[in-house]
Amino acid sequence: MTPSTSKVGSIADAVSLIPDGTRLAIGGFAIYQHPMAVVRALIRAGRRDLTVVGTVSGNEVDLLAGAGCLKRVETSYVGLEKYGLAPNFRRAVEEGRIEVVDYPEVLSFDRFRASQENLTFWPCDYLGGTDVLARNPDIRIFTCPITGRSLQAVPPADPEVVVLHAIAADERGNVILPRRHLLPQGLDVIMARGCDTVIVTVEKIVPRALVRRHAEQVQIPAYKTKLVVEAPWGAHPTAVLGRYATDDAHFRDYVAASASPEGFAAYLDRYVHAPADHAAYLERIGAERLGTLTELDTL
């Protein structure tokens, strides 16, 4: 597919690119700007044995863990920040249903930098004496050829598929980031640069003329994207910078439901399995509720 070809597709098309056993990176950070429409669709499709590689993970991993989609998670943290722990993830780990590989937060970020630069490892000098080094056979000790110091070689993230959510893109897959952007958006760009299969859901597919007028904001160019999907509110209940806020009430309901397997199963039935697609999910949330979250900003 050439950059001049339309890359517009559906959420179902996105899921078809993420088969069982995929090594997957999910955009966003903690409880911010995850491509939740695709996450819910993966659960609906019954995906299994996924490996999620991340930096600071949140409800996207917790939801997949509770639904039985995960085999392995490589990250620095899985939690819900001010809403507390990630209950489904914790249960799954304690019961031995998910393998967890821990990395420090900055090093988790650097693993994606290694993939971006097509490096076979990322050098590190601060893991000596820690359980991260003791419990991870993928990290190798080597001698620096210049200084003779003992260093650690950390494997790159190397996801097979990256799925992100952004505010806008054109039909060719040129993805726009707002001028005012933070760590979650910057990390999404690093993720995209280190993978050949990049899926982006967006709040809106915009005309190419608009992208040309805002060319300096195209941080993920068309040649890096495999598929672009228009999915308004596609990150709900997480926030999208400059578009809408975190749905606090929904997160509180999620945490309460996730206190037990039975409660979480009821949550999945109501918000994942019962709605046939993303549009039906939004109908279930309700236009009035979504309207209270709107935070429109300029590009």
Image (cartoon, helix red, strand yellow):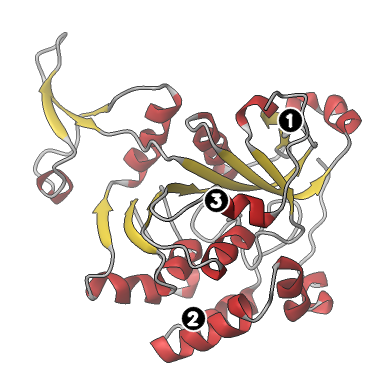
Query: Residue 28 got which mark?
Result: 3
Query: Residue 255 got which mark?
Result: 2
Furthest-bottom residue in this view: 262
Query: What residue type is disc 1 on?
Result: Gln
**Residue 32: percent from left, percent from top:** 58, 57
Regarding mark 2 in the picture, which secondary structure is present there? helix
**Residue at which label 1 appears:** 217
**Residue 69: percent from left, percent from top:** 41, 65
Regarding mark 3 in the picture, which secondary structure is present there? loop
Numbered marks: total: 3
Name the residue rendered at 35%, 42% in the picture. 108
Name the residue rendered at 17%, 39% in the picture. 127
Query: What residue type is disc 3 on?
Result: Gly
Query: What residue type is disc 2 on?
Result: Val
Foreground residue among 275 and 76? 275
Q: Earlier in the sequence, mark 3 or mark 2?
A: 3
Foreground residue among 147 and 263? 263
Measure the alpha-carbon separation of dots 1 and 3: 18 Å
Measure the alpha-carbon separation of dots 3 and 2: 20 Å
Regarding mark 1 in the picture, which secondary structure is present there? helix
**Can residue 86 be seen in this snapshot?**
no
Question: Residue 45 vs residue 231: left or right?
Answer: left
Considering only vertical position in the picture, is 287 above or below 115?
Answer: below
Query: Residue 118 got which mark?
Result: none
**Can residue 69 be seen in this snapshot?**
yes
